[in-house]
Each structure stands twice: as structure tokens, then as C-alpha cells.
Image (cartoon, rainbow, N blue to C red):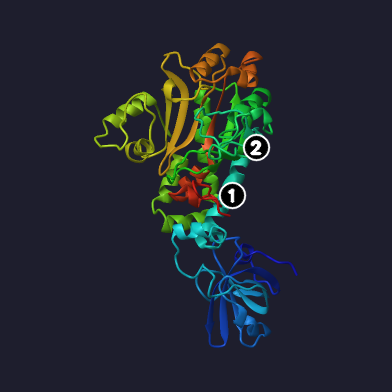
Amino acid sequence: MQRIRVKKALESPSGREDVLIKGWVRTRRDAKGFSFLEINDGSCLKNLQAIIGADTAAYASLKQINTGAAVALRGALVESPGKGQKWELRVATLELIGAADATTYPLQKKRHSDEFLRSIAHLRPRTNKYGALFRIRSESACAFHHYFRQRGFYYLHTPIITGSDCEGAGELFRVTSLPPQVTGEGSLPDRFQDDFFGKPANLTVSGQLEAELFACALGSVYTFGPTFRAENSNTPRHAAEFWMIEPEVAFADLKENMDLAEDLVKKVTAHVMQHCRADLELFARFVDKRLMADLERIVDEPYTRLPYAEAVRILEKAGRRFEYPVAFGKDLQTEHERFLCEQHFKKPVIVYDYPSGIKPFYMRANDDGRTVAAMDLLVPRVGELVGGSQREERLEVIEKRMAAAGLDKRDYWWYLDIRRFGSVPHAGFGLGFERFLMMVTGVTNIRDVIPFPRTPKNLEF
């Protein structure tokens, strides 16, 4: 006899006489002559109802079965007279695999706050909300890989430990094998030649620089992996460890980059809507009732595209007071981004041609001498989902940008070689995976779309 998952049992085209189900007890309800167990094994949102009659050998084992217990049930799938499911399991034998103490098991049949569930992140996937969320996360990851594979991109594994600072922000975690100094309040020695790598090493904030190298050899590549930021931020949109998807394409300009970003977001969102419908509907009912209508607009409508200067003019004339002032030369804040896509245009927006002074050294300088060929894709609830640019392929220009940013070009000799040997226009972007999940579920805190969030003063599990 082969074990089947709850999802398959509930979708079975016909009843089966002898099936084995293994899972966890969500609830137990006793009636005269019967006991009802709700069983879930993580394969779907719905539970399978199991009925144990007092005339079966399994009935004697029920005294040890509480919410949270792991069980193996063997019996027949029969038509359910109740509403909400086609089949239920008439149990012949029951085995207790792992008991759960009813007095201390923290997940009872009630709604728990997200704050409480973060404190028990090892158990929260057993709840309806987080089981659904992490199934959506899994399916979304597969959809991104599928999208790129279908379009001839090659999957690239870029380093997690790096000697480069892609963003130029300096908010990096240092990696060292050296012990702290005896004095100096635990500061690290300055003698990096004695360290493992012989030079300063950090956790990466991006795989973009390495992706550029491979795009200029393989044509189209993408990365999908963890990245790190050491900024001391406790906002709902920031975490110290997060996952980024970063495609890079040779012989591409800014327009082609925007086209790719828009198509990627549309196609993967549509995939999730098709393959995770039941799980998404939970978020549409209990998290954000506008969710499905917003997702349909993200999939079906063309995105608005406008230059940064025009976006600033719209914000200046918005007739509302923003927490952060709006002016040309200042970066857009989340409140500005959300106003543009949620209230003004009421759909996703791509802002492009940002002032060079607020963007990294590698973005291609425009002919106006003031802006660079950068673009951000803004979506409801989140603000910036995608940030990217056409890269600067001209050696003399990028060397000047690096000098202005205070970067030593000797540390980037390999990066500059791509501009020396067969340089071509190329473009790419980074898409925050957790921000995508926030967009498709309506969840407002990044800590709730990562299995084990890493934030300042938080390193549990």
C-alpha cells in the first residue's frame, strides 16, 4: 500500500478502498460513537476529515491523540456527506507517530498574531496562513526558474563571499577568520594580510558584477540566491538576509531591460495565480480583500513608463504632504513610489532616467550629462520591486565614475576587462524575491515571507 498526500486524496476522481495518510492533527472532535480528526500534511490548504468509529481497533488509541500529534491513518476514502470536501477517510487503523503535549503545544484552534508566530517560526508553517505562504514561495521560485529557462537564460551561481562592493553603500557584513583584538572593544585587526583571504572580505549585496562577466560570454544569464545588508533597519521592507533574482543580458539597452522586467513580473504573477489559486484566496479573504483585483491588473494591463523628472513633477503637484520632501536629485521614497502606482496611475509604474548623483557607478551615463539609464519598477503595496539599468560599457566613462565614487579601479581590474575586450551594451536588474511575495500575497512585513527572518538583534533558529 502506497502513502498518498492529502491534496491527492481530496482531488481523487474516485473513492479508494485502502489508502495510507500521514500527517498532523489540526483538531479532534468527539461525538457519540465517533471521533473526527482534521488531518493536514502540508500539501494543500484544506484538511482531510478522518472518521474513527467506536467499533474499530483504532478508537482505543484516541486518548493519546491531541492537536499537533503526528499520525498514520489507514482506511477507505468514501464520499463525504458534509460540505466543503468530496471525500473523507473512514479509518481502519491508526498509529501515533509523534505525540504532542496538549498543555504546551502553542498552536491551538484560534487566530494567532503574526508577532507571536514569528517567535515560533519553526512551527508557524503548520498554520493555514504560513503553510499557504510557503507553498506560494516554493511555486514562485520554480516559476522564475521556468521563465528564464524557457527564454534561453543560463542559471549562474555567484559568490556569497566577495571582495567587491557592488552598491557602493558600505553597509556590508565583514567575513573574517581573525579573532577580535584584545583591546579596542572587539574591533577587528587591520592586518588583513593575516586574514583567510588576505584582504577585506564581505557577504555580498548583489551578484550583478559577476553576472555581467558571464552575460558577456553566454549572452543571457540570471542569478537567484541570498544577498546581505548590514544596515540597522527595522522597517517592514528590510531584512539583513534576503533573496535576489538578477538577470543580465548582453547586447541589450534600457528599453529592452524594461520590457524584460515587465514581462517577467506579469508572467510569474500569472503563473502563481493559476497554480496557487486556493492558497492566494486565503490572503484575499483575510489579508487584503483587493488582492485578486490588483493582481489581475498587474498581469493584464500595460505598465506606465515615465522619466524620473516627470515623476517628480507629479509628486510635487500631488496636493498632499509627504514625510520626505520631493525634489529633483533626491531618491524616491516608498511613500512616493506607492503614491505613483496606487493612487495616481493605479497600476505598476516604471520610472527611468534617474539623476546620476543618486545611482551607482556602473549605470550608463545619458547624453544629457545629468542622468543615467536606470529604471525602477514600482508595484502596489511594495513600491520598488525591480531596480536596474543599462550598464556603462565605455571604459573611459566608467573609470571616471569609479574615481568620483572613491573606488580604486585596481580592485575591479577584472570588471574593467569586460570594457577592454569586446565590450558590448548590456543591461540587467535585480528583483527582490521577498518583495515579490509581499506583492502577490498582500503581506505587509518582509519577516512574514521569509522562513527564518534575519533582522537586527534577531538570529533565532
Mark toward the viewer: 2 or 1 = 2
Q: Position of residue 283 (x, y in %)?
A: 45, 55
Q: For numbered disc 1, what is the local secondary structure?
A: helix
Query: Relative to 151, does residue 280 appear above or below in the rendering?
Result: below
Q: Is residue 136 above or below residue 309?
A: below
* Mark number, residue 251: none
Crowd rating for badge 2 (residues with CA inside 10 Å; few <14, some 14–19, many 20+)? few
Task: Report the residue that reaches farthest toward the left.
Answer: 319
Q: Secondary structure at mark 2?
A: loop
**Percent of width and height locating residue 456:** 49, 46
Q: Quadrant of residue 332?
A: top left
Q: Amino acid at mark 1?
A: Glu
Tell me where residue 252 appears, x and y as whole percent.
Answer: 56, 23
The quadrant of the image that shows the C terminus is bottom right
Quick check: 304 left or right of 407?
Answer: left
The disc, 2 or 1, on the residue closer to the chain's N-terminal end is 1
* Residue linked to disc 2: 178
The Cα–Cα distance between marks 2 and 1, rounded to whole angstroms, is: 41 Å
| Residue found at x 56% / y 34% | 205
Q: Is residue 394 above or below residue 110?
A: above
**391 lies above or below 348:** above
**In the rendered view, does 439 fall on the left or right side of 311?**
right
State the residue in front, 14 or 192: 192
* Amino acid type of the residue tagged 2 in the rendering: Leu
Residue position for label 1: 139
> Marks 2 and 1: CB-CB under 8 Å?
no
